[in-house]
Amino acid sequence: MMSTNGLKSLAARIDRVLAPLVQPDTPGAAIGVIRDGRFVHRKAYGLADLEWGTPLRQDSVFRICSLTKQFTAVAVMMLEERGALSVEDPLERHLPDWPARGRRVTLRHLLDHTSGVWRHDTQMVERTLRPNPPVADVLAMIKGRDFEFEPGERYRYNNSGYLLLGAVVEAVSGMSYADFLRTAIFEPLGMEKTGPLTHGAITPFRARGYIKGRRRFHNARLDAMNWSWSAGALGSTLDDLALWDRAVREHRLIRPETLERMLAPTQLNDGVAFPYGFGWGLADYRGLRAFHHTGGISGFGCHMLHLRDEALTTIVLSNLYTFPFDRVTRGLLRAVKGWGVEAASSDPTPEQMAACAGRYVNDDGPLVIEESASNLASLSGDRLCERADPEVEYRFAEPRDGVFQRLDYVSPLWPTSTWRRAIG
């Protein structure tokens, strides 16, 4: 257990991490650091409601977005331990109306985002402008569209897969998804403030969601909840997520060997391993092995990270969509460990920015490097970094006619993603 002086020193270091990101009159975050089963830091920064000037509380309720996926994944594994299903089952075994169309999609493919099923939240109108259809209608839409690739061929983050898993939980358990999570997970663990967070329900201490415009903050548009459902519609608090962390670490819901299976890297058809398990991403930060997940949805962003080799967990819950939760998480880890990070102060030359600037694309969309970008610093002739977060690098390659054609985005907790210069 840390001494009183040690806790004060840690709090001061964490306050410095948050200071440039949250002001007293802006949206903010609830921050938790758990060591050996106890909070060593539990504090709220900023406002829950800008219009009323209401501060965030340590027990404020936030949308936890895609942190929902770990609950869905554990529900599936609990049902497997009961003998009700296997992750190797084809999807149509539990959803008889699933049109296989010659492709064998297993529950494993859905859990690790390698199914190739059509992603219902892409290539559509802006989601906050959509109606809130019954979940059954969203599932029918997913079932009616073509595959994006062969199951197991590649990793591509897929919310549709987790909606299908929610339907499997219902079909196998004979209960609604919400009731199964409530009776099998939330009530046994005492997670009294966790559950589907609907817009109509009166929820005490709920944080209001915001987005940041060019000059000011705005209320986030309400997101149609049934589009997220078992992939991202839960709400929770720091305290409830601490109970969840303890249950995962103490194997109160699933056996140790089941958790290890969930934290094994995904094996693609060609034998390549990808650092994602079942409902958790896998990372190594400065030699610290971790499993973690982020979430982002209209008005909210969050991140929860668990170290594998020591009992240390970080939680970031924000009511601002663009909140840099990844940067904060790494700042929390460094604060606990007493590590620093070298500042980046070298300005890129105009020639370097001219070679690097442009519009790059990959399967996830565009990434634009502005020639006048003031947020970037130079590490070398072909490497830039975020000035405020120098651990995040942009590495350029394949120069042609004075401009780079390839961009590798490198961030410590994530697999490197590659982007190609857009043509035209």
Image (cartoon, helix red, strand yellow):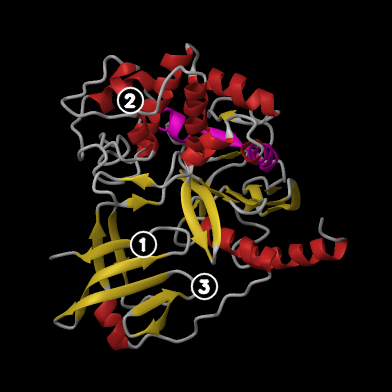
State the separation of the CA atoms marked 1 and 3: 20 Å
Mark 3 highlights which residue?
388
**Which label lies toward us, 1 or 2?**
1
Q: Position of residue 270 (x, y in %)?
A: 24, 48
Residue at 28%, 49% in the rendered image: 271
- Marks 1/3 in contact by CB < 8 Å: the verdict is no
- Residue sitting at 40 percent across and 32 percent down? 162
Of the numbered discs 3 and 2, the one sitting upstream in the chain is 2
Q: Is residue 236 magenta?
A: yes
Disc 3 + disc 2, Cβ < 8 Å: no
Q: Is residue 41 magenta?
A: no
Tag 1's secondary structure? loop
Q: Secondary structure at mark 2?
A: helix
Mark 2: amino acid: Val
**Count of numbered tags:** 3
Label 1 crowd (10 A; few <14 / some 14-19 / many >=20)? few
Residue at the spot 47% in from the left edge and 33% down from the top edge: 73
Question: Alpha carbon of mark 1 to alpha carbon of mark 2: how far?
Answer: 32 Å
**Residue 254: in sight, yes or no?**
yes
From the image, tell me which residue sits under label 1. Answer: 416
Are there few (<14), some (14-19), or many (20+) residues within 10 Å of tag 3? some
Q: Nearer the viewer, mark 1 or mark 3?
A: 1
Residue 12 falls left or right of residue 248: right
Residue 12 against residue 77 in the figure, above or below: below
Q: Mark 1 is on which residue type?
A: Thr
**Magenta stretch, residue numbers:** 225-246
Question: Quarter of the image holding residue 9?
Answer: bottom right
Hey, what amino acid is under mark 3? Ala
**Residue 186 coordinates in the image, percent (x, y):** 63, 27
Which residue in the structure is indicated by mark 2?
138
Rendered-image quadrant of the C terminus = bottom left
